[in-house]
Each structure stands twice: as structure tokens, then as C-alpha cells.
Amino acid sequence: GGPPGLYVEGSRLYVFVNLGRSPGHMGCLVGPASLSPYGWRRCTFHPLFGPNDGYGPLELTGPAANPYFEFRTISAADVIREGNRYYMVYEGIRGPSRPGVPDDQFGLGLARSRGPRIDGPWEKYPGNPILMDLPGNVGIGHGDLVQVGPAIYLYTATSPTTRGRYVLVRK
């Protein structure tokens, strides 16, 4: 899977990690921001979420495979706080599109905390994956959220050779 996501709040460090493969789940650990080896624990709600419906029919490719975009791996989280909720973009990997090829079906997912707690339950955006249909490209799932004043920017791959910047708008 991809790199862990990190979020610092006060004296606590939250680490968002991939928990296994096929199916993957998004896990959460919390510990001291001082990086002490003591005091680490699983978040209250662990795992935060998992895949929806398994791998799906093997013959599905392209947009028809979107509902299964996160079956194999859920990782590479980036989290921000907006108001009384937390928002996360994450990488979902369905797996290979056919036997004998490496993982080639990638998507970018969006989730948010159901309430004001970062370590409480989360809900996924029902329109996942966002930005592009499967197969996506290898960099689409590694999104970065940056907040500058009231604006929230999403940086992620838009093609195998280009990184794009999107302005997120609350609806």
C-alpha cells in the first residue's frame, strides 16, 4: 500500500494506515506527537472503513468497476479539519484488471468523519472514486489536501505525467 497519513492535533499524532489487502481497510492509530514509543493505541473506531462490495465481477473494467475501486488496498490518506468534521482523501486499489498484470486499477476516494471526533466513525462519499473512473493511473490515489485561508486545494495526478490542482467547494 501507500504511505501512512499523519494528522497532528494538540499533543496527539494520528496515523492513518492500510490494514491488510484483499480486502483493505483504513486503520487509525493515535499516540503522543512527541513520537514517544509509549502511549500508542488504536483509535476508538478501528478500522475506520473498508471496501463496499468485494472485487466485483472479474470481467468488469473501466467505469463499470468503480464501485469496487478500493477492494485490494485502502491507503495513502491525507486529512484536514473543516468546521466540526474531518475530511480525508485516500487511495483505493481494486487490483489487476486481468490475471498476470500488476495492480492497474486506481482511484481517489473521499471520506469524512460522521461527527467532531477524528477517531470516531467515518463515512465514505457515495460517488467514489472522485475525479476519474477506473483504471485511473498510478498517481491518482496519492492526493494532498492543503488549506490556505478559506480555500482547500487538492493536489493529485491528472495523468501519468501531470499533477493537477483542484479547488474544493462545499455544496
Image (spheres, grey):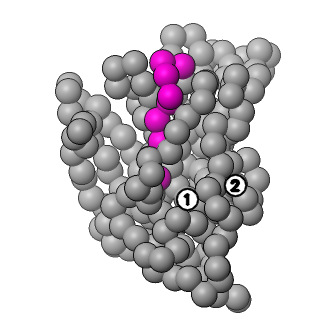
Extreme residue toward the top, this view: 11
Mark seen at residue 92: 1
Say which element carries label 2.
Answer: loop
* Residue 5 falls in image quadrant: top right
Q: Which residue bears the numbered disc 2?
A: 24
Question: Residue 33 at what x, y percent from top left?
Answer: 60, 17
Q: Where is residue 46 drawn, in percent x and y?
A: 71, 33
Q: Is residue 156 magenta?
A: no
Splitting the image into 4 quarters, where does residue 145 fall? top left
Query: What amino acid type should be assigned to the residue bearing mark 1?
Result: Gly
* Left or right of residue 36: residue 90: left
Precedes in sequence: disc 2 or disc 1: 2
Residue 112 shown in magenta: yes
Name the quarter where the N terminus is drawn: bottom right
Which span of residues is magenta-colored? 109-117
| Residue 56 vertical placement versus 36 (above, below) | below
